[in-house]
Image (cartoon, grey):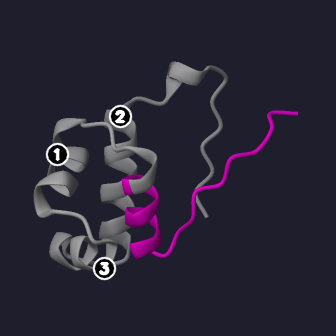
Amino acid sequence: MIEIIETTADAITPATVGRIIKKLRNEKLMYPKEVTITAGVSDSILYYIENKGSSPNLDTLTKILDALGYELTVRSKT
């Protein structure tokens, strides 16, 4: 489980999301192609998220995290 706690909504940048996804993928020893096939997204989408700081939409982010064996959870700050 990776928990990201930030105090402001704009503190998590698309580049940060990309670095986290790449880190999780590398920890799982998965090739990008394995993730894209499992997630049902294109190779270029994953490349741009991981390397170019592109911002994934919620559906794409959820699919990628699911392919990596993680889930996106949103909870109250309090």
Whether pointer 3 and pointer 1 mark residues with C-beta atoms closer than 8 Å, the reply is no
Label 3 vs 1, first from the N-terminus: 3
Label 3 vs 2, first from the N-terminus: 2
Give amino acid for label 3: Thr
Tell me the SS state at disc 1: helix
**Residue located beneath label 2 in the image:** 14
Magenta stretch: give its range.
60-78
Determine which of the numbered discs, if any, sits on residue 38 in the image.
3
**Mark 2 Cα shell of 10 Å, populated few (<14), some (14-19), many (≥20):** some
**Mark 1 Cα shell of 10 Å, populated few (<14), some (14-19), many (≥20):** some
Residue located 24% across and 37% down the image:
54
The answer to which of 29 and 49 lies nearer the viewer is: 49
Residue 15: % across, % down: 31, 35
Residue 62 in the image: above or below residue 25: above
Residue 30 in the image: above or below residue 73: below
Residue 19: % across, % down: 33, 46
Give amino acid for label 1: Tyr
Taking 32 as reference, is 59 left or right?
A: right
Residue located 35% across and 34% down the image:
14
The answer to which of 36 and 29 lies nearer the viewer is: 36
Determine which of the numbered discs, if any, sits on residue 48 in the image.
1
Q: CA distance from mark 2 to mark 1?
A: 10 Å
Quadrant for the N terminus, please. bottom right
Give amino acid for label 2: Pro
Residue 76 in the image: above or below residue 42: above
Residue located 62% across and 20% down the image:
8
